[in-house]
Amino acid sequence: MMCETRTTMLMRSCQIFLGLASVLSCVGTAMAAEPLAPPAMYPPNTWQGKSTAVVRVLNRLDSRAETIRVPVGEMSHYETLEIGVTRCLLHAPTARADAAVWLDIQDQRAEGAAFHGWMLAAEPSLGILESPIYDVHVVTCEGNDVQPMLPTLTPPAVPPLPGKSDSSQSGQKQDDAQGNAHGNDTQGDQDAAPPSSGSPTDTGASDGNRP
């Protein structure tokens, strides 16, 4: 009895395994028959303008840090620092998260440090306020969208299946061969009666091709 029970269990397990394999094979075939379009991506180095810059200022003397929001085109004060923002750009959503801010910073102390240029949130070492007292970093850009605006994101086309692509290419080659044969038959007529080179259509085509 125990041997028969084990045999029956093994047979059922094999049937279940074969059934799952058949289902997975069908699913794989169905998935392979439906190609997916690649994700839509903005071009590299694409930025969206924002109306407000978020900047963090650290006072090295007392280790106190404060986050300041400065609207574009305006100036904010932090202790002896004057912080002005000319532009604030946010990286496109499909790119690496980053923010770039053009800052005009001036320490009002005697012989205070100054900075005029871009600071990047993801690469703070590219723009540094060389001050023994203050450390300034860009956090992000926020607020309303301003120029420059992001371009329209066009979804990519779905690539054709390999089998369909090959058949379409073979059909295209056949059409081209037939067209070439027809062109060879009519080549003598075209040489005998060429179109007028001074026609408006020819002139417009040549004008349109000029750089």
Image: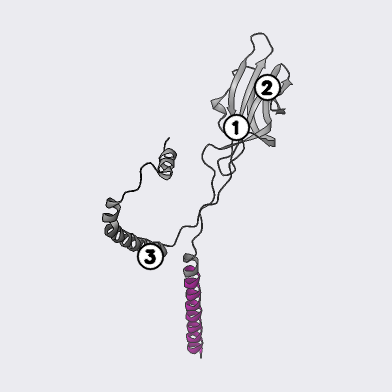
Residue that carries the numbered disc 1 in the rendered image? 121
Q: Which amino acid, mark 1?
A: Ala
Badges 3 and 1: C-beta atoms under 8 Å apart?
Answer: no
Which quadrant of the structure image shows residue 72?
top right
Task: Tell which of 94 and 173 is nearer to you.
Answer: 173
Q: Main secondary structure of the magenta part?
A: helix
Q: Which amino acid, mark 3?
A: Ser
Q: Position of residue 112 (x, y in %)?
A: 64, 12
Vertical placement of residue 145 versus 8, above or below: above
Spatial separation of the CA atoms under disc 3 and disc 1: 51 Å
- Looking at the rendered image, the disc whose residue lies closer to the viewer, 2 or 3, is 3
Task: Tell which of 103 and 207 is nearer to you.
Answer: 207
User: Is residue 124 in the magenta section?
Assistant: no
Look at the image and give the residue range highlighted in magenta: 1-28
Instruction: Name the residue at 63% across, 23% down.
Output: 103
Q: Horizontally, is 126 left or right of 109 in the view? A: left
Q: Position of residue 45 (x, y in %)?
A: 53, 36
Spatial separation of the CA atoms under disc 2 and disc 3: 62 Å
Q: Earlier in the sequence, mark 2 or mark 3?
A: 2
Instruction: Name the residue at 54% across, 49% down.
Output: 40
Spatial separation of the CA atoms under disc 2 and disc 1: 17 Å
Tag 3, which secondary structure? helix
Which quadrant of the structure image shows residue 92?
top right
- Looking at the rendered image, the disc whose residue lies closer to the viewer, 2 or 1, is 2
Residue that carries the numbered disc 2 in the rendered image? 84
Vertical placement of residue 143 versus 94, above or below: above
Give the color scheme: rainbow, by chain, secondary structure or one colour. one colour
User: Is residue 5 in the magenta section?
Assistant: yes
